[in-house]
Image (cartoon, rainbow, N blue to C red):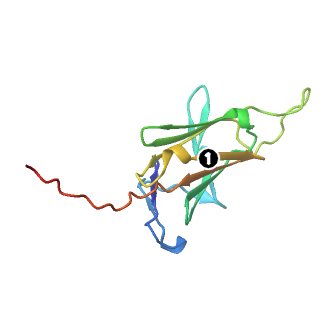
Amino acid sequence: MSLENGSSSVAVEHGATPAAARTREASASARSTTAGRPAAAAPPYGAETSETAATFTPLIDIHEGPDGLVLVADIPGASESDVQIEVEDNVLSLRAHVTPSAPEGSRLLHQEFHTGDFQRSFILSDEVDREAISAEFKDGVLTLRLPRAARAKTRRIEIQKQG
């Protein structure tokens, strides 16, 4: 099975063990990081900034099991109503909006969780059963289950006699 997103693709071969999964980075530019975070001059990890708002890329783990793929996305600060999941054609899109949650009358002194928009898209292979995709959301963690599509069964085709 395979998924692709804008910056990398994940291909999991049918019957392969998790250790055999391949990840290819499509982006040629590497960012300088410190303890898993970008250098101070860079925007926050996964952020695309504009003058009005920032869009963040949620961190996602992808696991393969016998029944298909499981995607686990961290969207801290989001609630279930803030998250949108859509499949259009062969593209799975995740979107969420996180608003600041400081208590009324307080002043934010330090922030490590991002607020704003989160967005991530994946191109689905034909091996994913799009109609059976399911989602769960709990404590800021979105779990998507992408089951394998049923393989067409082999059938014998009879030759029609003419005449």
Residue 29 quadrant = bottom left
89 shown above or below 62: above
Question: Foreground residue, 97 or 20?
Answer: 20
Q: Residue at x 45, y 49 (%)?
A: 124
128 shown above or below 12: above
The residue that mark 1 highlights is 134
**Which residue is at the far right?**
105
Q: Where in the figure is residue 86, as x and y percent of width and height?
A: 54, 37
**Which residue is at the far left?**
163
Question: Foreground residue, 128 or 50?
Answer: 128
15 shown above or below 80: below
Label 1 sits on a secondary structure element that is strand
What kind of residue is marked 1?
Ser
Which quarter shows the N terminus?
Answer: bottom left
Q: Residue at x 41, y 58 (%)?
A: 151
Please state if 108 lies on the left or on the right of 58 as rendered: right
Can residue 18 be seen in this snapshot? yes
Q: Where in the figure is residue 16, as x and y percent of width and height?
A: 47, 72
Q: Where in the figure is residue 98, as x and y percent of width and height?
A: 71, 35
Residue 34 quadrant = bottom right
Mark 1 burial class by Cα count in 10 Å: few <14, some 14-19, many 20+ = few
Can residue 41 be seen in this snapshot? no
Question: Foreground residue, 28 or 80?
Answer: 80
Q: Residue at x 32, y 60 (%)?
A: 155
**Which residue is at the far front?**
163
Q: What number of labels is visible?
A: 1
Q: Where in the figure is residue 22, as x and y percent of width and height?
A: 45, 66
121 shown above or below 31: above
Q: Residue at x 40, y 51 (%)?
A: 126
